[in-house]
Image (cartoon, rainbow, N blue to C red):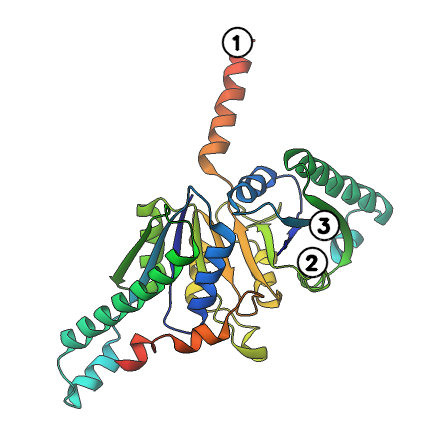
Amino acid sequence: MITRILIPVEDLLFEEEIREFLIQLSTLAIKLKVLHVIDANEVVLKWPSAEYQRESVALVSTICENLKNYFPGVDVVSSVREGIVKEEIAKEAESFQADLILMGSHGRKGLGKFLLGSTAKDVIPLSPCSVVLLRTQKSGVKKTKVAEASVVQQD
Amino acid sequence: MKILVAIDDDSLCQTVIDFVAKVFSHHATIVKLLHVVQPSSVVDTATSLCGHGENHQILEERIQQASAFLNTLRKDLRSKMLPSEPVEVSVLMGTPHRVILDCAEEFGADLIVIGSHGHGELSRLKINSVSYAVLSHADCAVTIVKAQQVFQNEDASEKLPKSARLLA
């Protein structure tokens, strides 16, 4: 049986964690769908819709390509929706017949690292399937920061 | 990968076990099954007043029942996973979400798996307060398993022993 996994993304923040989670799966007989939802409210406030749309498509295709390169042979598709984020994620999960939603615990807004994002929290009750919430790996983040700092010092 | 599976005493636990077996059966997986017995002073005092035994006796019984229950689940999980994968069992006492979080930290869990407590259409919209607290405060990834999993086996869940809490 193919496991269908829906991956809602807001940015590239959780890319590494998503990859590491997928490595742990017992099978690579999986079908992935990368989804970005354009927040209906945010469009009005910040961006011209066309520009936002372009950015969103670029984001999902970047993540898609990276996943395809990392997991050759795995079926990866992408989708961009517009609307209320939690509802669109749930709708997409239903139409994709997802077995699993895989998402980061928070997006760009809020106190991020310490709090659970409201979208993540709201998706759970609406979701037709199980939900995996990923956390950023504290040690991993520290390591890359240290490495960058040392390079700067050498320069 | 270290997976801590928090088991509550309802029918969803079979779904949780099947989820872990199906998704994470992997040569490098270490699973720990955890059940938390919460001492409920009101219920226990009431029961002891009714002459059904002492407080500690009831708790001990509940712990024993939970251990037996977890061992059944452990056998079930082992039969579905690779033979090399260790499955640990642990019954602890205290406030469920705190115990789960402490245990995850001590165990060095990469993932906590917990049920959402959804039965039927109406409560599909709810999330259990323990799951929510764990989700909010965990340092590692958390999986909320929903009852509507495709690989749910309803027959199996009916055969499972009834909950320790109900029996107590």
Mark 2 or mark 3, whichever is nearer to me? 3
Give the CA separation, mark 2 to mark 3: 9 Å
x 75%, y 48%: residue: A78
x 63%, y 54%: residue: A2
Tell me which amino acid carries mark 3: His
| Pointer 2 chain | A
Quick one: label 2 or label 1, which is nearer the N terminus?
Answer: 2
Please give the label number shown on residue A85. 2
Tell me which amino acid carries mark 2: Val
Identify the residue under disc 1.
A154
Mark 3 or mark 1, whichever is nearer to me? 3
Tell me which amino acid carries mark 1: Gln
Identify the residue under disc 3.
A36
Judge by depth and name the residue closer to the eye, B83 or A10: B83
Residue A54, how many percent across, how many down?
Answer: 83, 42
| Pointer 1 chain | A
Quick one: label 3 or label 1, which is nearer the N terminus?
Answer: 3
Crowding at dot 3, Cα within 10 Å, few <14 / some 14-19 / many 20+, comes out as many
Residue A102, how many percent across, how many down?
Answer: 59, 51
Judge by depth and name the residue closer to the eye, A133 or A1: A1
Q: Is the C-beta separation of discs 2 and 3 under 8 Å?
A: no
Any part of residue B132 in sight: no
Give the CA separation, mark 3 to mark 1: 39 Å
Q: Secondary structure at mark 1?
A: helix
Residue A49, how many percent across, how many down?
Answer: 84, 49
Any part of residue A127 in sight: yes
Residue A107, how many percent across, how many down?
Answer: 61, 47
